[in-house]
Amino acid sequence: MDDIQQPAESGARNGSATAMWLRQYLQLPSATTVREFVILFIVTIFLLLFGLVPGFGGDQLGLVGADEPRYAQVAREMLTAHSQACHDVDAKMVPRSLRLEDIRNSFHCIAGGTVTPILYGKPWLEKPALYYWRAMSFFKEFGVSDWTARLPSSSGALALVVLIFLHMRRFRPGGHLDAALITASCVAIVSFARGASTDMQLAAPFCIGMLGWYAWYETGKKFWLFDLYFFGAAATLAKGPVAPFLALAIILLFVGLRREWSVLRRTIWIPGVILYLIMVLPWYIAVQKRNPTFYRLFFLEHNLERFATNRYQHHQPFWYYVAIALVGLMPWTVMAIRAFVDSIEVSIAEWKVRHNPQRYLGHTRAGDAFPEFLVLWALFPIVFFSFSGSKLPGYILPSIPPLTILTADYLNRNRRTGLPQWLIWAHAATCALLIFVLALAPQHMKYETLVPSTQWLLIAATAAIAFGAVVFLTIRRWGIPQVCNVTLLPILAALVFLLGFYGKELDVNYSARPLAREIQQQAPDVKLVATDIKRDMDYGLAFYRNQPMIHYSTDGVPDAEHILVIRASDAADLDHWLSGRVYKPLFLYESQGIEVYRVYANPQASTIQP
C-alpha cells in the first residue's frame, strides 16, 4: 500500500513544484496592475487622440503653422516617389524569394523615395528623415490626411508615457502611474503630440534613452544600455546631432558632479555603438551621396548657424525658455516648481553627504542619485538653448518629462506627510487659471479682442472658480492620492470644450483647410493657385491642394486661368498686377482677412500654359 502511495505523493510534489515554477516565471499581472494599465491607456488615448482622429471627437483642426503642412507634404511626395520606385520594378519591400534579382528589386523599392526628402519635386534637406518615414507608413495605412500626418507624434508620445510608467514601476514604484499621467496631461506634451512635426520625434526617443541609461547606471546591467543607443539613434534620425550632444552633455555633467569618471568609459558599450552606427550612418551617407550639399546645408546652416545666429528670424529674449517651460507644464506648473526645488535641496544634501562617506557605510553609492540626474536633465536643454540665436518652443520639449517625473516622485515621497496648505491653494489656482484662459480663447479667436464680453468673462470666471474649488477641496479632503485624479478633470474638460465645441473655430482661424475646401467648391475646374499671404497659409494651401503655390513677385503672373488668394489689405495692388486681365471676386475669407479672386486666362498670350 505504501508503495502505491509513494508515487502519488511524489507526483503531488512534482505538481506543486511545477505550479510554483509557473507562478514565478509566468506571473500574471495583479488586479492593481491591470487597473493601472486600463486607467493609463484610457486617459492617455483620450488626451492624445480626442479631436484628432475621425470618430473620436472628430478631425477638428487642420494643419496649422508653416511646419506642419510642409512636413506632411514632404512625406506625401516621398511616399509617391517610393510607390513609383516599387511599381517600376514590380517589387515590395520584402523580397518574394532569395533570388538575387528579387533581393535587388526589393532594395530598389526600399531606397526609392526614402532617402532624399522632397518638397515640390526638389530636395528638402533641413531635417533628417524619421518623421517622414513614419508619416509615410501612416499615409500608406490610413490614407493621406492631416490627422494621419500627426499620428507619428501621437504614437511617439504614447510610447514615451507608457515607458515612463514601466520604468518608474520598475525602479520607483508608488509614483509610476502619476508620473505617466502627469506627463501625458501637461500642456507641452498634449500640444506637441498633436503636431505634424519633428519635435516629438526627438523628445520621445531621447527621453526613453536617458531613462534607459539611468537604469543601467543604477543596476549595472548592460541590457539597459540598449535603450540609450537604440533610442538615441532614433532621436538622431529625427533631428540630427543635437540628440547625442544633449545626452552626452547631461551624462557628463552628472558623472562629473559625482566624480565617477569611470562611468563614461563603461557607458561606451561596443554592441550599442555598433547598433547606433548601423541605424544612423546608412541614411546620412546615402543622402550625402545623392545630395552633395547635404552636409553643408544640414550641419552648418540648419544646426550651427541656427543656434549661433538669427538667420531664420526666430529671435526671442534670453528668458524665453523659462516662460515656455512654465506654460508647457500647466496645470502642473506650481507642483513641478515645488518638486524641482525640493529635488535640488535633496541633491545638495546628498552631495554634502558624499563628502562624509562614514554615514553611508555598506553602500556603493552615497544615496539616491535619481533626483540629481533628473534636475540636470531638465536644466541643461533650457540653459543651453537660452543662448541660441534662434528659439522655437519645441527645442526644450526634452526637458518636460524629467520635470513631470520629479513632480510624481515628490508627490509619492510626501504621501504620508501631505502637502502644505499654500501649495494646495496655488495648485488649485493654477488649474483655475488654465480653465479661465482656455474658456476665453474661442472669444478671442472669433472677435479678435483682448477684452471679451462681460457675459463670457463671468462664464469663464465661474467655470474657473468651480474647477479650482473642486481641486482644492478634493486634495484637502483625500490628500495626495487624489491629486492626479482631480487635476485631470479641468484638463479633460478644457480639451472637450476647445476641440469638441469650438474645434471648427480653431480650424477656420488657424488652418488653411476650410479655405482650400471653399476654393474647391467655388472653382473646381481651376487648378493653378497664386498667393500673396502669410507663409503658414501658403504652405497649408499647398498641402491641401497638393501643388506648389505661385507667387506673383517671384514667379510672375501666369497667363493661364488661376485662383488668386491675397490679403484683403492688398486688394489695391490688383490693378498693378492684373492690368488688362479679367478677374472677379469669388469670396471673402473674413476670419483671416483674405480675399479670393478668379483670374481668367490672358487673351493676349500666344500660348496658354496648362
Image: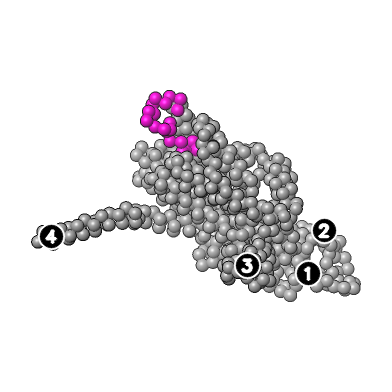
Label 4 vs 1, first from the N-terminus: 4
Label 4 to label 3, Cα distance in Å?
67 Å
For the point 56% across and 56% down, which residue is it? 153
Question: Whole-percent x and y of residue 606?
Answer: 90, 73
Q: Which marked residue is nearer to the observer: mark 4 or mark 1?
A: 4
Amino acid residing under circle 1: His
95 left or right, relative to 336: right
Is disc 3 surrounded by few (<14), some (14 to 19) or many (20+) residues within 10 Å?
Answer: few
Q: Amino acid at mark 2?
A: Thr
Residue 452's spot in the image, x, y percent? Answer: 59, 52
- Name which residue type carries label 4: Asp
Q: Is residue 560 visible?
A: yes
Secondary structure found at label 1: strand
**How far is mark 2 from mark 1, CA to CA?**
16 Å
Q: Which residue is mark 4?
A: 3
**Residue beneath disc 2:** 554
**Which stretch is magenta?**
354-373
Q: Secondary structure at mark 3?
A: helix
Which sits in the foreground, 189 or 327? 189
Viewer-closest of 411 and 283? 283
The N terminus - image quarter? bottom left
Please name the residue that numbered disc 1 is placed on.
Answer: 562
The label nearer to you, 4 versus 2, is 4
As drawn, is 436 to the left or to the right of 19? right
Sequence-wise first label, 3 or 1: 3
What is the spatial separation of the Cα atoms under label 4 and label 2, in whole angstroms? Answer: 101 Å
Q: Are marks 4 and 1 in contact (CB under 8 Å)?
A: no
Residue type (three-letter) at the residue carrying disc 3: Leu
Question: Label 4: how many residues lie within 10 Å, few (<14), some (14-19) or many (20+)?
Answer: few
Q: Residue furthest front?
A: 3
